[in-house]
Amino acid sequence: MNTRAYMLGAAVLVVVQAGVLYLFGQPAVCTCGYVKLWEGVVLSAGNSQHLTDWYTFSHIIHGLLFYALFTFLFPKISVWARLLMAMGVEIAWEIAENTPTVIQHYREQALAQGYTGDSIINSVSDTVSMVAGFLAARKWSVWAAIALALFLELWVAYEIRDNLALNVINLLHQFDFIAAWQAGT
């Protein structure tokens, strides 16, 4: 397959992502009526509604991890095929994350009590951020990718008391001590 075919495949995946979220009733953009490049307030109606937010960094880490995973599992297929696989997983998560069950589960957490799901533009931006992480991992050394992932995890935890690791833990099981720390108590 040539590069154009992979690019077309990537575009189709993103269109499917946006279409499914539209069918779920997610807004195309923030219901506030405008689009911001960055929404830095986690406990706000704008979180997960604009182009980027604190959770964008988790999606960059997804890309780093997916590059490592798919390179390990499928070393003989092209990087572009691995990228399409990574996009498939990321988009499947973005769709699952916007189902009523997962939205309700997030609402039970200290930092996501008003969560209504992602806007379509935010969800697509999350996928683009994963692609950026994937492509960075392709170019960088393993140690540089690990250093970036650790830096982002620690920085985001410091800034907002949440990150990819805590998000996964809370999705699987909510611990009282994590909830108390995230709530600032």
Image: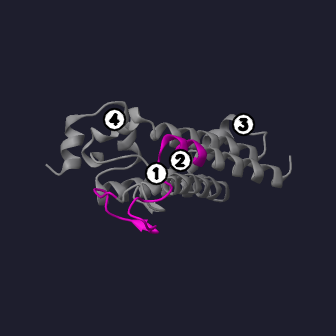
Choose mark 1 or mark 4, whichever is in front: 4
| Mark 2 to mark 4 CA distance (whole Å) | 21 Å
Residues tagged 1 and 4 counted as in contact (Cβ below 8 A): no
**Which numbered dot is residue 58?**
1
Residue 170 seen in this snapshot: no
Q: Does the magenta stretch include residue 29?
A: yes
First of labels 3, 1 by sequence position? 1
| Mark 3 to mark 2 CA distance (whole Å) | 17 Å
Q: Provide the residue span drawn in magenta.
A: 18-45
**Which numbered dot is residue 74?**
3
**Which numbered dot is residue 140?**
none
Q: Which residue is drawn at 56% across and 53% down?
A: 124
Choose mark 2 or mark 4, whichever is in front: 4
Amino acid type, label 1: Ser
First of labels 2, 4 by sequence position? 2
Q: Is residue 124 left or right of 173 when viewed as pictured?
A: right
Which percent across, then down, holds residue 113? 27, 45
Q: Which residue in the protein does label 2 denote?
A: 62
Q: Is residue 10 left or right of 181 when viewed as pictured?
A: right
